Amino acid sequence: MAGILIIAEHRQGQFRPVTLEAVAAAEKLQASSGESIAVAVIAPQPAVFVPWVSVSAVDEVVTVTTPNAEFDPDVTGTAVKALIAARKPSVVLMPHSVDSFGVAPAIAAELGVGFATDVFDLRYDGGELVATRAAYKEKVFVEIDFPGKETVLLTIRSNAFKPAGGTGQPAVTEISVPGIEPRTEHLGWQEPPASGGIDIPGAEFIMSVGRGVGDEANIEQFVELAEALGATLGCSRPIADNGWLPKARQVGQSGKLAANCKLYIAMGISGAVQHQWGMKHVENIIAVNKDADASIFTVAKYGVVGDMFEIAEELKAQAGGN
Ligand SMILES: Cc1cc2nc3c(=O)[nH]c(=O)nc-3n(C[C@H](O)[C@H](O)[C@H](O)COP(=O)(O)OP(=O)(O)OC[C@H]3O[C@@H](n4cnc5c(N)ncnc54)[C@H](O)[C@@H]3O)c2cc1C
């Protein structure tokens, strides 16, 4: 038996929509291979999640009932290995997440299947699976093939594929996997740090500062400028990591998504992909950077090659702050 098998994710009793992004990745393969798509739901009450994964591309939902409520790498690992042994899928897709970090490499090593993580594109090339991921801090894209591997396990980067949609009526198959026992005890969830009223996802106008600001002592003038302009102040990760601004202001992959932003000013930000993740969709991006080759200019609508401090002075004067 072949086909594409997706491992659904859930956390704190909630379905994780990244699963549908993995379904979309499978659909892309299916368009050229015609393979069937099955989604495995490994959960204490898997039936709860079946409607969530019953999108039009899915042919079958396979349920495995587990004794534990929250993710446990041994339980998921045992279940996934049993499913691979029983079904021999050509491709297994898992969301690239803290859960898959804990289990996917071990499964791949134990079974000797092909493996790549953080994959953001995939295709069949002459019948051979090719997965694309980044390397060297996103500076190069690497295409990986898996010669001689009957099964390939890939973890799929979030936001790389538009979630699959539509309503389907997949067959539902219950599978019993013997010997699935958790070896860890889930003690509880830690609340994320309070945002202190900072609302990057809700803000319509964001002005973010990056490492071009140079020194903590220079932050204050951008706090004042944001206030004068009526913008919410955001920042790149190094600024938050240095503790110069609260983490709640960080825009990007490991920060916040500027979900409702209509105008984004990036000051002294190079435009790394992880930062772009949080803002490149914004329709009006203005970038200020003294390096004309900075990547931020590839997503900006308007670019100013110049010194952020000079531009800040001018903006403050225009806003009536001087
Ligand atoms: C797993 C992972 C997750 C990450 N998540 C995030 C994230 O959520 N958000 C995020 O931002 N980053 C994230 N990063 C880090 C990211 O890769 C970059 O390192 C970071 O975005 C760089 O921040 P920066 O642009 O402020 O700094 P730099 O890359 O150092 O860029 C500074 C820029 O300022 C310009 N500059 C310097 N002086 C001036 C001046 N006087 N006037 C104008 N321009 C000037 C320079 O030309 C340069 O382009 C993540 C990285 C990893 C590996």
Image (cartoon, rainbow, N blue to C red):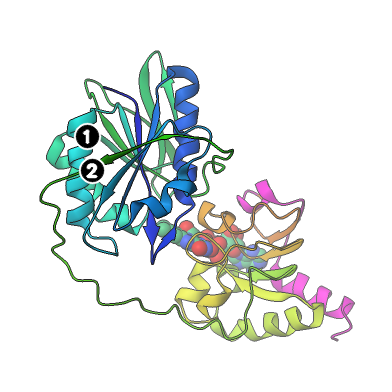
Residue 269: image location, x then y, percent: 60, 62
In three-dimensional space, the C-alpha distance between marks 2 and 1, rounded to whole angstroms, equals: 6 Å
Residue 17, compared with residue 147, is above or below; it is: below
Give the residue number, with chain letter if any, for mark 2: 80
Q: Quadrant of the N terminus?
A: top left
Residue behind label 2 places its C-beta within 8 angstroms of ligand 1: no
Q: In the visual, does 93 lie left or right of 246?
A: left
Residue type beneath disc 2 = Val
Residue shown at 66% from the left, 46% from the top: 298
Q: Nearer the viewer, residue 286 or 289?
A: 286
Residues packed near mark 1 inside 10 Å, few (<14), some (14 to 19) or many (20 plus): many
Picture layout, residue 97 above or below residue 112: below
Disc tally is 2
Query: Residue 84 got which mark?
Result: 1
Q: Amino acid at mark 1?
A: Ile
- Residue 315 rendering spot, x and y as whole percentages: 82, 74
Q: Is residue 185 above or below residue 259?
A: below
Q: What residue is drawn where x is 21% and y is 20%?
A: 148
Tags 2 and 1 in contact by the CB under 8 Å rule? Answer: yes
Quarter of the view holding residue 184: bottom left
